Amino acid sequence: MKKSLLLIAMMFVLASMIGCATSGDLEKVQAQQNLINAKAEQALQDAQAAKAAADEAKVKADETSARADNAVKQAEERERIADEKAKKADAVFQKSMKK
Amino acid sequence: MKSAQENSWLAPDHLEKEIERNEFPVARGEDVIGRLAVIRLEKGDTLPDIARHFSLGINAISAANPGVDVWVPEAGERILLPLNFILPDTPRKGIVVNLATKRLFQFKEDKNSLVVSTYPVGVGTKERPTPTGQMRVARKAARPTWYVPASIAEDHRKKGDLLPAQVPPGPLNPLGEYALYLSKSGYLIHGTNKPASIGLNASNGCLRLYPENVEMLFNDTPVNTPVLIVNQPYLIGQRDGVVYLEAHTPLEDSGAVELEKVYAKLKNFEKKSAAALDWKRVKEVQAEARGIPVPILEMSQGRAKGAAKIIEVEHPAALYGRPELPELKLEAWYVLAADLRDEIEALRIAAIINHQGPPIPARVLTKSNGYRVIAGPFNDMSEAKDAAKRLKIDLEIDGILIEPVKKG
């Protein structure tokens, strides 16, 4: 019996020390949670946007690189054709110089 | 890529108006004559025009300037004039022709000094090569008649071009104005009606010179002058204590044997010299085959004067022998030779047509979406048809006749 009374007394003391949560406190916590949530959402969206931008940039870079490769190949081909034409013209010229 | 030091001797020393191109004194014990020069190209120049003005063959100017477009070089580009020659390894007497360098040397003793005149030549093809060996000038003729050999007549017949049995003196005569008949029957040293062929393997075994050069040679060469024809693609010579190597692209199958000979000579020079020979450099000179004497060894260090400096030559107001282009006339006939989108290609074709022998005037006209190569003006339809026939036979061009503009 003594032990039970002591436990009840201690619970009262503890309750008076901590104090009970009011409805105002709960709203404040809710608001904080919402804010953090919103921030997380924003961060997630930002990260997704950044990834999308990075992906798009990579696609563009790959595309540009492929186009540059193609342009180089085309330029080389043009040069090869021009060289061939020059050589052919020269060969015809040399033939025309015979008696 | 050569280091700046290796190629520093190629930097021009100073600017001069003129440069000697044909006649040089030969100092006792020396083998190198002339000097290298550079010239800055102007718009419309072609390498064959520059070559002829400076008495060089097209082979020489092309080899000295690898990568430069022969027909449409860039204006402002500085090109090398290889007017520096190592004399062939032969007795210095009479006429000596080096087939590999496509150059003729005429030695003349003047009291105690030796003078050499040198001219570029066109030589025989692979199929009809110029013979080597000792011969002499058997006779000479000004304004020679060309008796067409059966083999050449047959070649032309196959192309649809019927030649007469003989061609009198004049612009259609491929012998030009002067001929020196050699003791080896059927072979001549003569002029040409195709000056752009000098420096090429284009003859049927004869030796061709520019018209202005053959006249000098003709007047300066007595009958019975000895003529020695050799094939020396690699030449070694000394001047002012410096040993030079001049390498040319060897003719068919002659490279390996000639190279062995030149290596043996170089080893001999190395033994006599205090310095070691840079064999890597020797191999580079041989591989590049630019046809210019390159300093490779100083015989006695400290006493040698060093390699000769090269000069820059002023571009002349007019290039000697450059084909003339008459003004366009509405009442004339023309031949449309090509219709192209590429300007360089059009300019090249026009230049090649201009350098035919006899020349066919041609120019590039710009249109909205391309370029036209027009040959002419021609006085009448017959002239225009003849030109179209030559374009077809010689250059495989199917030309279209353009009638004169009718007066309203």
Image (cartoon, helix red, strand yellow):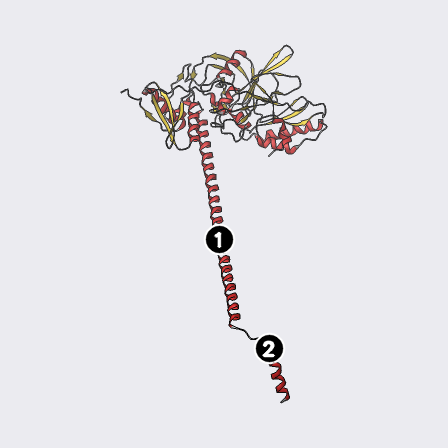
Tag 2 residue: A16
Amino acid type at mark 2:
Ser
- Tell me where residue B276 appears, x and y as whole percent: 70, 31
Chain containing mark 2: A
SS type, badge 1:
helix
**Relative to residue A88, is residue B54 drawn left or right?**
right
- Tell me where residue B351 appears, x and y as whole percent: 44, 25
- Tell me where residue B202 appears, x and y as whole percent: 47, 24
Relative height, residue B257 to residue A67 (above, below): above
| Disc assigned to residue B348 | none
In the picture, residue B89 is in which quadrant? top right
Mark 1 / mark 2, whichever is N-terminal? 2
Amino acid type at mark 1:
Ala
Tag 1 residue: A53
| Residue located at (72% from left, 23% from top) | B303
Q: Quadrant of the N terminus of chain B?
A: top right
SS type, badge 2:
helix
Please name which of the two marks, 1 or 2, marks the residue nearer to the observer.
2
Q: CA distance from mark 1 to mark 2?
A: 56 Å
| Residue located at (64% from left, 31% from top) | B5
Same chain, marks 1 and 2? yes
Given residues B366 and B285, the one toward you in this image is B366
